[in-house]
Amino acid sequence: MRTPRYASPAPPELSGETHRRPVVVIGAGPVGLTCAIDLASRGVPVVVLDDDDTVATGSRAICWAKRTLEIWDRLGIGQRMVDKGVTWNAGRVFHGARELYRFDLLPEGGHRRPAFVNLQQYYVEAFLVDRAGDFPDLIGLRWKNAVTGLAQTEDGVRLDVESPHGSYILDAAWVIAADGARSPTRSRMGLPFPGQRFEERFLIADVTMQAGFPTERLFWFEPTFHAGRSALMHRQPDDVFRLDFQLGPDADPEQERRPERVMPRVRAVVGEETPVTLEWCSVYSFRCARLERFVHGRVIFAGDSAHVVSPFGARGGNGGVQDADNLCWKLALVLAGRAPESLIATYDEERGHAADENIRHSSRTTAFMTPRSGAERALRDGVLALAAEAPFARALLNAGRLSRPCSLAGLSLQTPDAAAFPGGPEPGTACPDAPVTDAAGRPAWLLDRLGGPFTLLIFADAATDLRPLAGLDLRIVAIAPTARSLHGAEILRDILHDPEGLAAARYGAAPGTAYLIRPDAHVAARFPAPDPEAIARALARAQGRPDSAIQEAA
């Protein structure tokens, strides 16, 4: 991809404009841009500051998970990512030249999005920049605008900013720091970033070649072409392949990134006769770390500025986009005066929980891949020896527990079930998708009708009476055999049909089952019948309103 350069016009503050911005985002990477687009889609004006004027170099983050694609669908950019990306659901794991097993992350049909697409980060950022351009009155992208100072006020944040046209002051009600793993904002605020550093070094090489390798995740423990270490291969768009090689803790980064060192490793995988060109390479080590708190007054940390993990499992970029998905609806409600400021604290609660889960999985993967003790190595060697034949050993084999949406079950915004359910997503779970048809019989996807505002999803039949729900402040969507059979159909935003029965099956739904869906398409509560008082209480709780408001809703 030809790297775009973005213009840096003079900021209006240099001409005397002084009004305070509702939200300023620091960092125009995938997380910062997703935050800006999400907020703009909710009518919140945003200024994005970035100290560069281009997108990422090298492929960097490439594996984008189903949940992330579904978030981008809601923001109007998912299809473009899928159209350009390389779709994959399956992977294979080898020990030496022996295949241990093959896995499929999406073994059933009836899903709009695949388990993953591979797409270089520079494409992701460029597509997000293009989408941000669809909100010219709500998103201001300021390239080559570097934050040089930050001070919190009683009800906001004051930023000192250096631009190519001069220095200026920018006032904001809230600041989202999405400025990466080396976050200058985090350093500027003096915030500790505790965690564990892993000394093992890895080489990433992006190479261009026309080769017949399958569109799968290929992982080798101790391959014959790279004895004693591990290796990983992914196909990307434009005939680009990503190869990762474990080098060991004593590898010299400067030496190992030289082409004369990189290309023999690559050719050992792809063969001497395959025409191949080195596009980009890097040598890295990593750490697993997180801020103790992600919310510091009116400054909120998201993505790598808040937490970092190893690249094995694709939990970094995906986790950051899910941070944005969790945060922005809450911030929009607070700014609109529809929720108390304390709702922002639940971002810290929920995404802190997710960060802990990602770090736990990442640390376990690293311990399996790079055992540091005799006991760890004995365990790994035993698992590798048994994995091809023994399912219990295969479950212990850890080549990266790949990104999945984190459950928020049991956390403060969710209402626990008051009755037993035969199946379906429990409160706190990300909503599953399913194929449906609209009122006119046209094919559609369920997730397109969920997320955005609070939504009540009802599986209705002729006996379901919707009229008592008319006073609820939320969008109501029904899945029903026919609109004519519904009492109170006029209050519905959408009437959908479930021709294959997959929606009812995935939601464990009987006639009358209702789900309260959060703006980020997580389940807030579920009910065996649409009880208006119980729904009102659950809605108040999901909006972070105090106990007195919840009781009043009853």
Image: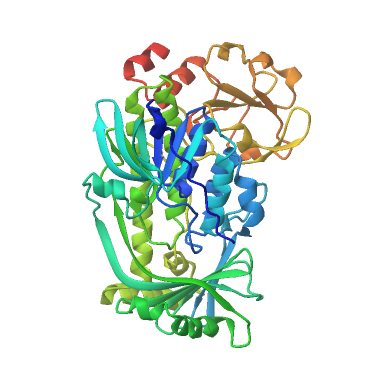
Which one is nearer the viewer's eye here, 131 or 319? 131
Residue 525, position in %: x, y? 47, 29
Quadrant of the frame with the N terminus:
bottom right
Q: In the picture shown, does residue 538 fall above or below 30?
A: above
Can residue 416 be seen in this snapshot?
A: no
Q: In the picture shown, does residue 365 fall above or below 360?
A: below
Q: How many marks?
A: 0
Quadrant of the frame with the C terminus:
top left
Which one is nearer the viewer's eye here, 264 or 357? 264
Q: Residue shown at 52%/17% (left/top)?
A: 473
Question: In the shown orientation, is residue 389 left or right of residue 378?
Answer: right
Residue 318, position in %: x, y? 47, 51
Question: In the shown orientation, is residue 27 left or right of residue 508?
Answer: left
Residue 37, position in %: x, y? 52, 38
Residue 18, position in %: x, y? 37, 27
Can residue 7 be seen in this snapshot?
A: yes
